[in-house]
Amino acid sequence: MFQFDPYAPEVDADPFPYYKVLRDEQPCFWSPQADMWILSRYADIVTAGQDALTYSSASGNLMTELPGRAGATLGTTDAPRHDRLRGLIQHAFMKRNLESLSEPIRDIARDLAQSLREREQFDFVSEFSSKFTVRVLIAALGLPTGAEATVDETTVRNNAVMMVQSDPVTRTKGPQHLAAYAWMQDYAAGVIAQRRANPRNDLISHFSTAEIDGDKLDEREVLLTTTTLIMAGIESLGGFMAMFALNMADQVDARRACVANPALLPDAVEESLRFNTSAQRFRRRLMKDVTLHGQTMKTGDFVCLAYGSGNRDERQYPNPDVYDLTRKPRGHLGFGGGVHACLGTAIARLSVKIAFDEFHKAIPEYQRVHEQLSWMPSSTFRSPLRLDLVLQR
């Protein structure tokens, strides 16, 4: 009997055969392990993402939600509160000129790549993508550095990654995940206090002061927005960078094309977001009964939107299991979709493009160590815990 358990290690390792069965045979599937419905076809996921009146985010959007987030962050609210939050947060993003980050991002990537170019082998996750993403978040958000910093980069990253994980046995957030979440809120509160006392041209300063027609984010909204952005920025960007490096290592012709012509990197980024995104599954809650593919989902039921499956739906993308650098996959779900599409897409695309431009200048030829990968235990995100690369001279 077919089962789909989003907490199972074998699903973390390779969800795509499961997605294929779901799409072809049970596109509206009840998973008792997840205690929710699974929607796996592209068209159904897009429809649900655009219908917030039916598929609500106000009960939380992570497959296993952290306490206190629902109803207070951009991803866990519905209109009209969502529209208010998005307007205020977009206002902060607009004030923070992202193009001004291009050179700092390039400097970070260049320094890290150059430090690895003489190595024979290294772990891309711990020695490049993890360090890169935290340093980019420091520059963009305004996280403290130097004498201001009370904790190191590794501690910030480890807590951010722990927040998005789940216990595969209990299928819940365990004490270690909740402790990481509490730590991150305390850390964010301290950063917010610093920026209010000493505002700068960074996102946290702008969140604290963003105002439209006299309306501002309240204290809880500023705190949880900052906490979520640190978590999502580190994990979403770091996870996708690891997945992109995995794709580049496996797709040798595509990588060599990007090395020879870096102008192809944006196309490679989009195809990687479709082919192997780190953002795999997010949930919604039904506000009314919905009948789909012969199944009736009841009011109050949770529904999983399996973005990773929608991106491999042959009804939308021909030969979806083939990585095609020329595909230009319009409408992919690598950053989610609908009203809750990721707000940080511009900085993510910019960061990955610059990072791999510099990485490939320093290290044009590499292959991965073909040992079994260990995957992060998360019902929502998917990325390798390590990615060992061997340099080829």
Image (tube, rainbow, N blue to C red):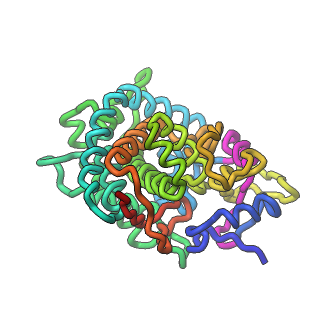
Q: Quadrant of residue 169?
A: bottom right
User: What span is in magenta?
Assistant: 32-55
Q: Quadrant of residue 219?
A: top left
Comparing 31 with 4, the one in front is 4
The quarter of the rendered structure image containing the N terminus is bottom right
- Give percent across and percent down for residue 156: 30, 57
**Number of marks in picture:** 0
Residue beneath the point at 84% across and 53% down: 291
Residue beneath the point at 54% across and 50% down: 253
- Give percent across and percent down for residue 263: 47, 34
The quarter of the rendered structure image containing the C terminus is bottom left
Residue beneath the point at 23% across and 43% down: 193
108 part of magenta stretch = no
Q: Is residue 223 visible?
A: no
- Give percent across and percent down for residue 84: 51, 32
Q: Quadrant of residue 337?
A: top right
Q: Is residue 359 above or below residue 25?
A: above
Comparing 69 with 376, the one in front is 376
